[in-house]
Image (cartoon, helix red, strand yellow):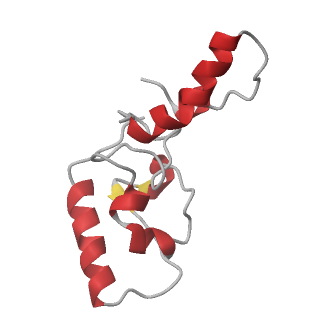
Amino acid sequence: MLCSAELQIKNRNGSQFWRSLLDLRPWYQKGRIMEIISGNQTRFWKDCWLGDCPLEISFHKLYLIASQPDIEASKAFVDGQWCITFRRQLNENLQQDLNDLLALLREVSLTE
C-alpha cells in the first residue's frame, strides 16, 4: 500500500524515465484505492479509501460545507464514533446524504 506521504515527491531531477513516472502520478492517484489501518495518513474526504472514488466526489454537497475538508480519517474517528462537522446546519437532503455516508462508515473501524 502506498500512502499519500510516499506520493509527495517534489524532486523532478533525474532521468527521463523518472520524470515520466512522476508525470503519471496524478493519473495513478485518481484511480488508486487505499487500505487504511489507523487513518493517520489518509485524508477523509480527498483520498480514495472507501468505495470507488474519494468521498469529496461521492458526497460532494457535504464536502462543500465540511468544517474540515482536509481532515485525516483518524481525526474524524473519535472514541469509536465518526465525527464529521459542517459549517452550517443540514437541510433534509443533506441530512439524508449524511445518513448515507454514516451507513457506509458503519462498516469501517480504525485501529491504532
Q: Is residue 68 left or right of residue 29?
A: right
Q: Residue 51: percent from the left, percent from the top? A: 27, 47
Residue depicted at x 47% and y 25%: 2
Image position of 27 (left or right of 18): left
Residue beneath the point at 50% across and 30% down: 3
Q: Looking at the picture, does residue 19 appear above or below residue 72?
A: above
* 48 and 98: which is toward the camera: 48
The quarter of the rendered structure image containing the C terminus is top left
Rendered-image quadrant of the N terminus: top left
Viewer-proximal residue, 101 or 52?
Answer: 52
Q: Position of residue 74 (x, y in %)?
A: 47, 47
Using the image as rendered, state which of residue 109 and residue 45 is in the foreground: 45
> In the rendering, at what x and y percent does residue 5 appear?
60, 31
The image quarter in which residue 104 lies: bottom left
Residue 45 relative to residue 110: left or right: right
Is 86 placed above or below 82 here?
Answer: below
| As drawn, 65 above or below 5 | below
Q: Nearer the viewer, residue 42 or 27?
A: 27
In this picture, is 88 found above or below 57?
below
Residue sitting at 74 percent across and 29 percent down?
10
Indicate the quadrant where residue 15 lies.
top right
